[in-house]
Image: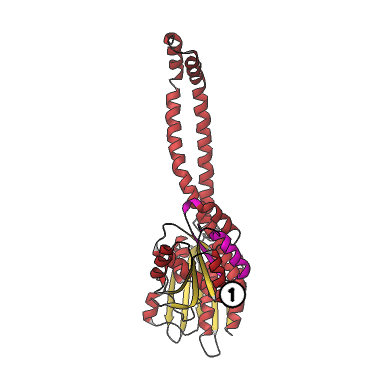
Amino acid sequence: MKRQDDVVILYVDDDLGNRVVFEQSFAHRFQIRTAASGAEALEILAKEPIGVVVADQRMPGMPGNELLEHVKRRRPDVIRAVITAYADLDPILRAVNDGLVARYVIKPWSPADIENMLAWAIDAFRVGQEHAEAQLRLLELERLATLGSIQAAILHDISQPLSYMATNVDHLMHLAQSAPSLLSLVKAHGAGLSQMDRENIEELGSDLGSLAADMNRGVVLMRELVQNVQRMLKASRGTSQALTDPLPTLRFALAVCQRLIMHAQADLVVDHPETLPPIGVGSAELGQVLINLLANAAQALQRRGSPGGRLDFVVRETPTTVAFVIRDNGPGMSAEVLRKVGTPFFTTRKDGTGLGISQCRRLIEGAGGTLTLQSLEGVGTVVSFDLPRGGRGV
């Protein structure tokens, strides 16, 4: 796998062992600098061309989210990420919501998770160097996706104890059916009980049924709330429950990438009908895919090295899908490179400004669509994908 040396990653952790493990795990691919504290990290940031900062949350003196707040003020172009324990999700959630953190990783982390995050962060930083607005839009989409993943994780963890509660409440309601009999036995044979025990048992016998019924109603309500939020999160991630009018997102993606295409000195030809049916994917996911693919095509055209560059963006409606085609007459790819495209963390560009075919494929296939690539070296590249339509009305 190609080493990426042009963007420096700064890893901040007060634990020497963690710093050694991090550097040994990823120095084969990335240029890694380490710091033992927030103060040291800020000194390095002031002197060196850092592109990505990854901080541990639990550090004495200056926790990770506080450090990243300083980084945001001093170097807003730097991509910020945090490694945190599950117990620290609350401050991280606030950090994500405030735009301090683009990505977070829960301990214990796996090398694949970190490598994926670092590759994405480098790509996002490179895009910002050429088009700050595109980076901001990308990070906003990422922020929404991250918040959704945090919420989904919390809801998942709530569901398990809620299931235990429901089971116990059902059992309690069953036991409550015998409460009148218990009360009768105490009245007839409870002479040896203390006054307090008799009063408690009498109260239990008279109130247990209504208490169990109230608890059951509460559990049912909580389950419905959790299920409703889970359905909304699934819709925002692009499941078949999401219905998105693709045209506003299409226009937004073109506006974000317009300067990149102009910088490539290429002609842009857009061809789509005036109306399109809604499709089964979230607008955030569709926007992320389109921005990624259009930016990739623009970068390919920059490497063309001769006039006459052209980018065609065609959208068509089929009986079951909406089909998108992005075609460029850039340098294209060899058959060997084409076979590797879509493999996680693989990039075809020396300057690395692409945002990841693997991410696009994940989002498209997660929504029930398909993505295909065709390319000929010296001729150009065609990326096409389709997404299931969800009806005629929006």
**Residue 146 x, y percent position in the rendering:** 52, 59
Nearer to the camera, 104 or 384: 104
Point out the stretch of residues depicted in magenta. Answer: 58-87
Q: Residue at x 42, y 69 (%)?
A: 23
**Residue 255 x, y percent position in the rendering:** 62, 73
Q: Which residue is drawn at 46% across and 32% down?
A: 169
Residue 73 magenta-drawn? yes
Residue 57 versus residue 271 in the image, above or below? above
What is the number of callouts on the image? 1
Nearer to the camera, 363 or 374: 363
Q: In which quarter of the image is residue 96?
A: bottom right
Q: Can residue 198 be seen in this view?
A: yes
- Give the residue number, with chain letter if any, for mark 1: 257
Q: Quadrant of the N terminus?
A: bottom left
Q: In which quarter of the image is residue 49?
A: bottom right
Q: Residue at x 58, y 55 (%)?
A: 94
Residue at the extreme bottom of the image, as rendered: 306
- Is disc 1 surrounded by few (<14), some (14 to 19) or many (20+) residues within 10 Å? many
Residue 76 magenta-drawn? yes
Residue 139 versus residue 298 in the image, above or below? above
Q: Can residue 294 be seen in this view?
A: no
Q: Looking at the picture, which amino acid does disc 1 mark?
A: Cys
**Residue 61 x, y percent position in the rendering:** 55, 59
